[in-house]
Amino acid sequence: MKRKDRGVDPIPWWLKTLGVIVALYFILPTLVVIPLSFSADQSFQFPPTEFSLRWYQNFFTNPVWLGSLGNSLLVAVLAALLATMVGTAAAVGLSRLTGRLAGFARTLLMVSMVTPAIVVAVAIYITFLQWHLTGSLGGYVLAHAAIGVPFVLVAVTSALGGFDPKLLRASASLGASPVRSFIRVTMPLISRGILSGAIFAFVTSFDEVVIALFLRSPTFQTLPVQMYNSVTFELDPTISASSSLVVVVVTAIFLVPQLLGNRKKTR
Amino acid sequence: MTTTSRTRRAPAPSWLLLVPALGLLAAILLVPLGQSLLRSVGSPDFTLDHYTSLFTDGVTLTVLGRTAQTAIIVTLVTFLLGYPYAYLMTRVGPRMRGVLLTIVLIPFWTSVMARNFAWIILLQRGGPVQSVFEFFGAGNVVFYGSAVGVTVAMCQVLLPFMVLPLFSSLGSIDRKLLLAARGLGSPPLVAFWKIYWPLSRGGVVSGLILVFTLSLGFYVTPALLGSPQQSLIAQLLAQRTTQLLDFAGAGALGMLVLVVTLVLVAWANRFGGSISAIGAVAVTPTKDNS
């Protein structure tokens, strides 16, 4: 039956070819930066003529690059923490609420996902000028946490979808306070959703460049901003090492929940 | 503790849980955008001059037209590549579908700066793309600093937003309908056009609107890969803010872009392809692998 099915309705060759081409279009640009990062050339020539580790060496010894990396990590960790806390609370709250007002609150919390980054960046920039938050750690953390919230909300809401509220009633009937019930019952069951939301918030902040470009100052800038500078003002090939590191680290970060998910599935 | 008192008390803490998130959102998004709106209509006296000058200053309309043109081209290209790809995803086995879905999500994962840097390398003078064109006898094609280069790079990032709504729409179409039409003597193209295409239209419309909307706000890609003479609306907005310090004019332009975006997103929402739904696919990609 199956073989007959295939004979009657095969996937045409041109469709397969097009699929391969589109897949390459998705993958190739990312793969270019990795060989380039091992180049010995001062220019951005591709493919490289000679290979070396000099751009990695420069990345890890140059205080400007290292400082930007440190700033980015700090901002991303704090922004992800803040976004995860307020986002998880909001997701739990929304899961218990129905009605038009709750729907409106959810839309409002999701809205930063669809507003163009440049519009938000410009508005935040002018307001933060008045609040003296440009170029400060606090300003970056607040702005990046705000755009990270939708990811946490989506991830935790989807985890709560499989959560049985009867469990909370059971735990309350056994004498647990709401807080204790949340920590002992809800949290373990939605921990994967929280983790995945936190990872997305972290990566969103770590990779964010438009708002960061407006909030930057000579004393405080993040890695994407330094990468932006290195192709616009300085033409510093260290960006190739930086790009490869970011691509590899972010891919590894995303594979963690994937692998966790697979392990759970096979169990 | 009766049940009635418990149900009456339940909503209050639930709303309280929303306070921190709404507070953060209000401080970081709503207040700045609200201030921006106030500035755009004149802080001391109400005026719409900043809005009317958008249409009369000669520059803004040109840039808006160019942005719309770029967005339309990007939308069409992603559609022409995305539709067959999404269709292919519905045809292959579950394992291959997982691979194809993971590949679609790669542009989501890869760093904005790394991706744009990669396109600079590929499209630069003497770069791999030019070499390929040279090989085919068109030596003098340089895409770096041109609208074509910007389009090529934008399409790659935006393809997931086309493929994902299309995949969810095409995946729910019963292919037996198509086979039945063929069995009744309909040529493949007619069967596709009369049966498959109408059923896929919801996903098509939401994909088209999403990609068009998102491409309106691109800043980094045109700034790095395009030329200053070919700037798009986002660059104009940045320039008015940081170089001309025309906060009121920038506010009016920003509001225009924001309103157009939100209207289009709300429209796309009606076809079930909201950006938040796609965010959900991106955040929980494992769910679809089974």
Image (cartoon, rainbow, N blue to C red):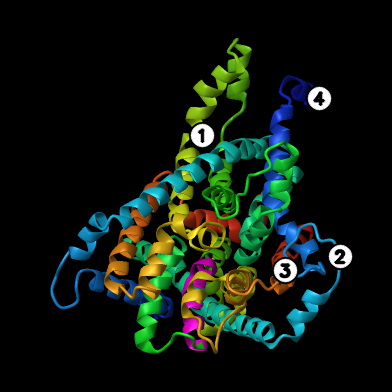
A224 is higher (above) or lower (below) than A17: below
Foreground disc of the pair 2, 4: 2
* Marks 1 and 3, how far apart at CA: 41 Å
Q: Earlier in the sequence, mark 2 or mark 4?
A: 4
Q: Which residues are magenta?
A: A137-153
**What residue sits right under mark 3 in the picture?**
A240
Image position of B129 (left or right of B205): right
* Marks 2 and 4, how far apart at CA: 51 Å
Foreground disc of the pair 1, 3: 3
* Marks 1 and 2, how far apart at CA: 50 Å
Q: Position of residue B289 (x, y in %)?
A: 69, 50
Q: Nearer the viewer, residue A60 or A158?
A: A60
**Residue B123 within the segment the image draws in magenta:** no
Crowd band around label 4 with a 10 angstrom C-alpha radius: few (<14), some (14–19), many (20+): few
- Label of residue A3 in the image: 4
- Label of residue A8 in the image: none
Q: Verify CB contact (< 8 Å) between mark 1 and mark 2.
A: no
- Label of residue A50 in the image: 2
Residue plotted at (58% across, 45% down) = B163
| Chain on which label 1 sits | B
Quarter that holds the C terminus of chain A: bottom right
| Chain on which label 2 sits | A
* Marks 4 and 1, how far apart at CA: 28 Å
Crowd band around label 2 with a 10 angstrom C-alpha radius: few (<14), some (14–19), many (20+): few
Question: Do marks 1 and 2 share a subunit?
Answer: no
**What residue sits right under mark 1 in the picture?**
B200
Secondary structure character of the magenta stretch overall: helix
Foreground disc of the pair 1, 2: 2
